[in-house]
Amino acid sequence: HILATAATNGAVVLWNLNKASRSKQEHVFIDHKRTVNKVSFHMTEPMWLISGSQDGTMKCFDLRIKEATKTFFSNTESVRDVQFSPHQQHTFAAVSENGHVQQWDLRRPDRYFQHFTAHSGPIFACDWHPESTWLATASRDKTIKVWDLAVKPTCEYTINTLASVGRIKWRPQRKYHIASCALVVDCSINVWDVRRPYIPFASFNEHKDVPTGVAWRGDPQLFLSTSRDCTLYHHLFK
């Protein structure tokens, strides 16, 4: 029942849907100086929240004490996405405007432990694979790349898309399937088999404007999508 949202003024806002009052706002963190691009909850530690901002920093918030407990400096112009690893409790990945990927340990805010160039343009999104040591990245360069981070970063698969990619999400219980939506031009939501990088495995064309988000419902047959056309669709594979 707790939601977190990111704002263009640098605020990270917590909402409590169980609040009896009309306003569900629980707390506002004002630690960032510029737009916050992404907030992400930890998968097993529900009181940990991480944010990535246009100011080039990431912050980890402890919701119990309502404070930013750690700040991480990416040394890049802006952080576009941050995601906790589902495999290692203290690890998170951050992707940035300059095409770089960083891996950080929460216990070592002074320096990332891995850094590599993944794309020739800004990376807008990343998503950890739920089972494998893969991290998918999506970029303005019209590609989705799948990196194996088990030892050193290795590009396992590259998907070529028609437009810049704004969002990606691995499909549950389907190892090689990932959903994507474009940042501009293309209103479809495509589900790709990473082993067949040129043709989408499935395409959903309900939206009349660019999709802004996609989320699986823990089921490989069902997902939700939002769009600039002010609609939310519930999609079903048949």
Image (cartoon, rainbow, N blue to C red):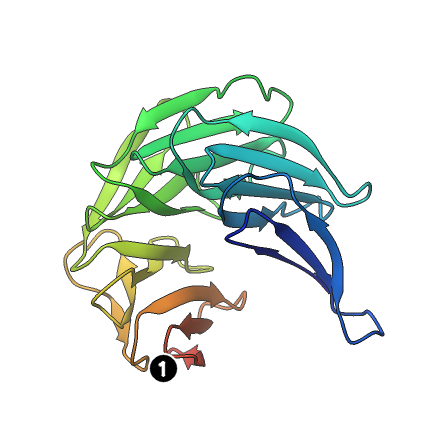
x then y, percent, for residue 237: 38, 78
Query: Which residue shows up at 62% across the image and 50% down it?
Result: 12
In this view, 138 is above or below 88:
below
Nearest the camera: 53 or 93? 53
Q: Horizontal and vertical percent for residue 160?
A: 17, 52
Up-down relation of residue 125 to residue 193 (above or below): above
Determine the image quadrant of residue 81.
top left
Query: In the image, is 68 to the left or to the right of 35?
Result: right
Q: Residue at x 42, y 22 (%)?
A: 114
Residue lying farthest top? 110
Q: Is residue 221 visible?
A: no
Where the N terminus falls, by quadrant? bottom right
> x%, y% of residue 106?
62, 27
Q: Is residue 136 visible?
A: yes
Question: Badge 1, how many Cα within 10 Å: few under 14, some, many 20+?
Answer: few
- The C terminus lies in quadrant: bottom left
Q: Which residue position holds label 1?
A: 238
Residue 76 coordinates in the image, percent (x, y): 39, 28
